[in-house]
Amino acid sequence: MEDRSGESLGTVLVAGAANLAIALAKLVAGLMSGSAAMLSESAHSAADTVTELLLLVAVRRAARPADRRHPFGHGKAGFVWAMMAAVATLVGGAGFSITHGLHVIGHGEELSNLTPSYIVLAVSFVIECVSFTKALSQLRGQATRYDVNPLRLVRLTSDTPLKAVLFEDAAALVGLLIAGTGLLGSQLTGSALWDGAASVAIGLLLVVAALTLIQSNLSLLVGQAAPRSVEGDIRAVLLEQPEVEDVVELLTMMIGPGEILVAAKIDFRDEASAAGVEIACDEVDRRLRARVPGVRQVFLDPTPKRPR
């Protein structure tokens, strides 16, 4: 857990610093040019900065050790704070962008010098690329560790801070392209429709990203199981134990970012003694923790297989 939380912390810090600098630059450029898309992008980056602060809390809270009142650790606290971060993106960034864009479409706007805005968009794109590359590098490292495709892992991962940074940075890069298109369209046509529509599009983009992250964190809070490939690895380790006849039932649950609880009903061979079953359970526990990344809690229940 320490290594993974350290990776996520570094990713969140890089993203947070980038978003804060970008938000200020976009705000100055937006005020200078009067562009709705630039002000929406400023709100987007400001919301992302607040999101990174909440994700920082998520990483810290999830890494707290187990105690008497929380015997399974504080991993799910990370899911709660990550969901709050997604809500902040939805309410702050998306809400402002859509309402301001609709106002501009209905009432128009006066654009002035757009050169600073184009410069800020270009620099912001480079900075966001750096942040996105950092998050992508961490994702690829985890994908290698679990031996899965990175695109599949980003859908299934319980490392919500990493997932949030990836989604936000991807949305930011697309949003910058949309804002640039809106500015250019308004500059060439003289119509505020382009800039206002770009602001609304940025807001809708944030809505999609935020709702996706909210749904993901909600599933984890309710008690999402480990990916099927991981459950297959767990079942294989259980069946490798000589005393095990069959796995009657296998249940898993994500109890924190990258942390798995395993509960299984095991049909042990009839010839296995009580002492042999105890030794086998201890050996299975050790093997699961060693061979399946993320296994933190293991509960095995000797259960005879019911006849059909």
Image (cartoon, rainbow, N blue to C red):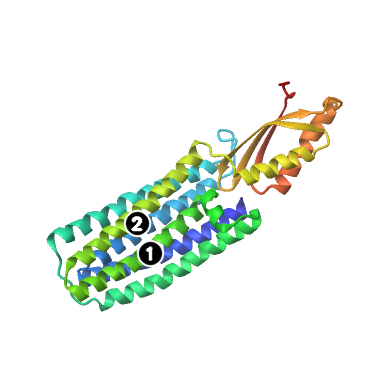
Q: Position of residue 27 (x, y in %)?
A: 27, 67
Asked if marks 2 and 1 touch (Cβ < 8 Å), the reply is yes
Q: Which residue is mark 2?
A: 205
How far apart in space, not on screen, are marks 2 and 1 (Cα)? Answer: 8 Å
Position of 199 relative to 237 (above/below) = below
Q: Which residue is mark 1?
A: 174
Q: Position of residue 57 (x, y in %)?
A: 46, 50
Position of 12 relative to 182 (above/below) = above
Residue sitting at x 56%, y 35% = 70
Task: Give the crowd class for mark 1: few <14, some 14-19, many >=20 residues within 10 Å.
Answer: some
**Local secondary structure at mark 1:** helix
Viewer-nearest residue: 31 or 114:
114
Left-right relation of 236 to 33: right
Left-right relation of 306 to 32: right
Q: Position of residue 175 (x, y in %)?
A: 35, 63
Inspect this view and state whether residue 253 appears: yes
Q: Residue furthest top?
A: 307
Q: Which mark is residue 225?
A: none
Q: Amino acid at mark 1?
A: Val
Quadrant for residue 33, please give it. bottom left
Left-right relation of 307 to 230: right
Residue sitting at x 38%, y 58% = 48
Inspect this view and state whether residue 93 appears: no
